[in-house]
Image: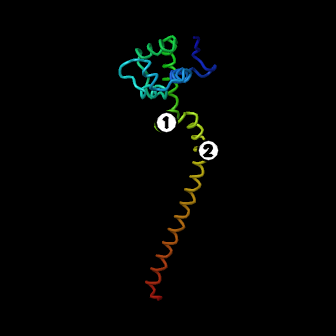
Amino acid sequence: MKLKLKESKETPITLEVILQNERLKRGWNYKHLAEQLALPNITAKNVKKWEYSFEYPDLKTIYRISELYQIPSEILVQAKNNGYAEGLHSVNKLFIKTICYIFNLPIKAMVIFSYIFLYILLPLAGVGAIFLFASKIAIWNFVVNYLLITKFIVKNHIL
């Protein structure tokens, strides 16, 4: 099997992409892959964390994955290094991956939602906050004016 280290000219392929693509190509779930690896202390949760780049497999596990998927271990190690480098440059991706991991959502769906949130919902919330703040100022002005008028009435014995 021939696997290139780059998906395109600019984006190097990462270990999580390789792991997810190979698992899905075979129609396996996380649990099945963990069973196929036949390594102690490797569970479906570990596999899921690898694919979301919260953890990376150790070298022994990478070697076992390379045997299972018939991919040279050098490619997997390089892809792991690419994943480290990509992760250092992207805090936003880490946030998105965390939300996807917690709610078990596909990453593409969360990226679309984040754009909707950032460009539609957040500005609308900002406008709503401005109106809320303006109404609170209006209420506060009313209260202050009421107190001042009451004080003036009491002080001047108008009533």
Amino acid type at mark 2: Tyr
Sooner in the amino-acid sequence: mark 1 or mark 2: 1
Figure check: 16 above or below 158: above
Q: Mark 1 points at which residue?
A: 104
> Which residue is rendered at x = 59% and y = 14% of the image?
4
> Which residue is rendered at x = 60% and y = 43% of the image?
116
Determine the CA span between mark 1 and mark 2: 24 Å
> Which residue is rendered at x = 57% and y = 57% of the image?
130
Q: Nearer the viewer, mark 1 or mark 2?
A: 1
Disc 1 + disc 2, Cβ < 8 Å: no
Q: Is mark 2 on a helix, strand or loop?
A: helix
Figure check: 101 above or below 131: above
Disc 1 residue crowd, few under 14, some 14–19, many 20+, Cα 10 Å? few
Point out residue 146 in the picture as x, y percentages from the top left corner: 49, 76
Point out residue 142 in the picture as x, y percentages from the top left corner: 52, 72
Q: Name the residue under label 2.
A: 119
Point out residue 5 in the picture as x, y percentages from the top left corner: 57, 16
